[in-house]
Amino acid sequence: MLYVKELYKSYETGKNKYEVLKGIDFHVPQGEFVAVMGPSGSGKTTLLNCISCYIPFDKGNIRLGGMELAGMNEEELARVRNTKIGFVFQDFMLLDGLTIRENILVPRIVQEEVGQEAEKLADQLAAMFGIVHILNKYPAEISGGEKQRAAVARSLINNPLIILADEPTGNLDSKSSRAVIETFIHAKQKMNATIFMVTHDSFSASFCDRVILLKDGSIYRQLEKQEERSVFQDRLLDAIKEMSE
Amino acid sequence: MGTMTNMKQMEQKLQKADRKQSRLYLFCNFMALMIISAYSALMLSPTVQKVFPKGGDSAKQMYMIFVMTLVGCVVFTIYALGLFFRHKSGQLGVLMALGASRRRLAPGLYQEVIFLSGVSAIAGTAAGFPFVQVIWQSFRLFLVDSSDMVLMFDFRCLFVSLLFLLFVVGFACLTAWRYLKKTNIMEVIREEHINEPVKELGRWCGPVGVLVLLAGAVMGYQAPSAWHVWFSAYPPAWAGVFYAPVFPGLYMVMLHTVVHGWKSHRKNPYKNIISRSMMKFQGRQTVNNMLVITLLVAGGCFAIFYVPTNAISSLIHYASQPFDYFYNYQADQKVPDREEVEALGREYGLSFKDWKACGYVTLGIGGDAMIEEEDGRSYHIEYVEMKSEATVLSEDAYRELTGQEVDVEPGTYFNLTNEEETALFTNESAREFTNMVTRTKLATQFAGYLYFDLLVDVDRDCCVLDNEDYALISGGLTDDWRGQFVRFNVDGEDSYPFANAFYHRFVSSFDASCERPSYYDRVQKIRENEEGKVYWGDTDDMTTISYDMSDSFMFRTFWVYQPDFRILNQNDYARNMGVMFMMFLFIFLVCMITAMVVCYTRCQSIAINNRYIFDDLKKLGASPAFLDREVRSQCGSVFKVPSLVGTSAMFLLFTMILYANDGRIIGAEWAAMGVCLCITVAIGGVIYAVYRSAVKVIKGQLGIIYVRK
């Protein structure tokens, strides 16, 4: 479903060039919940931003649902972002001037395809994630956990091929973090959603089917969950410790 | 449920929610356009144009401050636009991230910025006219009024506003285009949170900045004189670039203020560390804003200092003149004689004493002249016979008129100057006088100076000759080259109505041959006509004055026979100079209003940008007193340093100008400087009041409740 092949990305600051991604290769099949972990500066967020077409990459291939992203023009990339990708930001990025219902519907509004069916779907998603009671409120009036669940609902409104999440629990307390992770699991189970999440949090990552460890712009190791969540979390922590030695 | 279904509806709702940001942008644009529109309307109005001589220093100063204000408004509007887009970018970025293509976003964004910038710019331009009317009419109502002060507009001034309006709208569209063009969506999303740190320099940058600033000021001021001396040429228009070091100097001073502050922190290096770092991270905009504020405060002070420095020396001059009435006239004019004047005086209950009338002649005088080369820029000094007109008295006439003893050797002349010796262009190089009727010449040489202020005329020499020389050279002169000086005092208290009535009768007794300004030089005209040239005074460049406007600024300042009636000059001074003084007062108001608006807006953005830091500090247990100090520390830097630098720089500049006039500072100038100092203190008081109000508002916005004891 998502193929990333030989992906390179660098940044230039003045005369210095920093290689951030150095030939990343991996594949995420439909319905898998994958986490990417790694120390700060390892390239996690850059990888996510390249996949989501937010920043251009230097070299390599990204194929999403059979479509090559490299070489697409601006309009085509916007369409991919709108219909094939759902994105969840660390700081929610809800639009302050819109209600939660309207925020969930924004990807449909961009398509100008808001009808009763879209509204019904928004209500269903809200019900699924336990935010029906805040649908008519504004972002400033709700908690961080509720904002993030609203953001997850927004990411699913167009039934995308993949949800990309950048540290979705980074700004939340443990209770809200768990609620957000449960919304992902719910989406995966009920809608067969594919989720690709960048996180620092081994607890959140331990809910995933697979964890990709990044170090210095390359894949250091990939861990598949075959055991209980808590045991997997311990294995993850060991691997992270080993990576940092 | 009424859910929105399309982009347009969504954009409208988002715009409604962003009212606060839009209002700030609208306000900033409106203010900038109103100020530019008002300034250009007044500056280009016929009322002001006829009072400010073309190419004169006052006009140049007026245009120079306009350019400074324009630059200030440009920086201010760019800053306001930046604030608006910083907020807008988060929204744009999210919509892009959620799949809105730039093509979808462009129409709504352009529509919004064109609407906001266009409406505010048009409203500001329109508001400029009532704004200037209200201020001008208030001046007329409460300060001074004269026939000169009837405000008329030349609507060509709209061209300036239109250019600025196009700039505002064009720049807004360009910025929108730049945002839409960005390929990195994350950059657009994060724009709102991106800091603008300044490149830090060491602690040396402040003191070095002060030196560079002073060096620029001295270089710029001295450059024209140096150019004259070194190249024997008029300084080119670009000679102003010698002032250029002032700007990097100012930048370094402001940078030092933002990055290090001026207080030594050796004893307590952590004091103000938080406020200093907050300022550093928004340093680029802060430094730019502080530069603009400094320039505007300096411009305002320059304008307001102009009034006392000009007024006080004149008023002291009037008060110290030895006679109540002193005037001269051409001998062929039917000016009221002593009997008529005394009869008029009796009508007002006045009697006169010390009456004295003495004859004089107008001769051609030779001298060193600056002869322009063909390029019109460089020149050489050359002796010219019949260089210009000179008013010439015999030693007896001089003695009678002034009461001063004088002994002039035959074949020599004394030139008149004022007691301060500040009169410019006095001729020490004459070798002969010429009778302009008979063309007889009298060889002569400079013998020295005599001092009598009332005889000093900036446009012509006044010389005293030996009695026999005088008789010799004046023989055969017709009455249009002869004249009378008259002086008398009032026995008792003088009367303004008499002076006014006498003045109007005096003016009305002259015929059209005398309807000319004092710098119309008949000798120069004859010489140039004889050389086959057209005298510049006979071209359209010459100022025209009219007896019909005998109370106007132009007439009373430039008429060749304008009399010195002490009580008339004293009472009418403010009225005569009204337009000029009120224009400078207006410039002062405009500059200070703009500076205070920029200060206030900058402080507002400190509150907006640092809100989360203040929240964190509260969570970390910072007391209200600490938070209060942090707010005051930042706002203080924005208000205090530019105000201090702007006012001090102008005070020093004026001191330098007064000193450079004659290499010393005389009594009237000390008095003027004292008044300027009082004005500076008053300006400081107003700025402090605005600062206090800004701090109060910002503390309210940040939820800091603390009242200093």
Image (cartoon, rainbow, N blue to C red):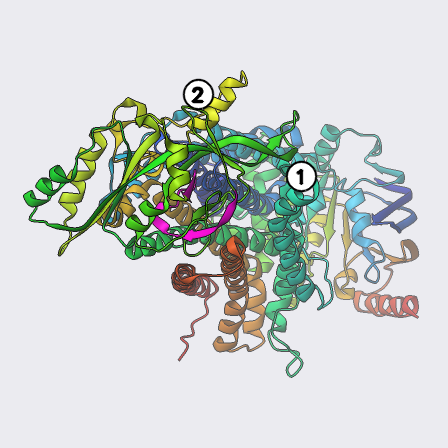
- The label on residue B232 is 1
Residue B358 appears at what percent x and percent y?
27, 42
Between residue B295 and residue B144, name the one nearer to us.
B144
Q: Which of pointers 2 and 1 lies earlier in the amino acid sequence?
A: 1
The picture quadrant where one finds residue B382 is top right
Left-right relation of B330 to A103:
left
Residue positioned 25% across, 39% down in the render: B146
- The quadrant in which the C terminus of chain A is found is bottom right
Q: Give me the C-alpha separation between circle 2 and circle 1.
A: 28 Å
Residue A11 appears at what percent x and percent y?
84, 48
Give the chain letter at badge 1: B
Residue positioned 11% across, 39% down in the render: B339
Stretch of the chain drawn in magenta: B445-464
Residue denoted by label 2? B538
Secondary structure of the residue carrying tag 2 is: helix
Q: Is A196 placed above or below A116 here?
A: below
Q: Are marks 2 and 1 on the same chain?
A: yes
Mark 2–mark 1 CB contact (< 8 Å) = no
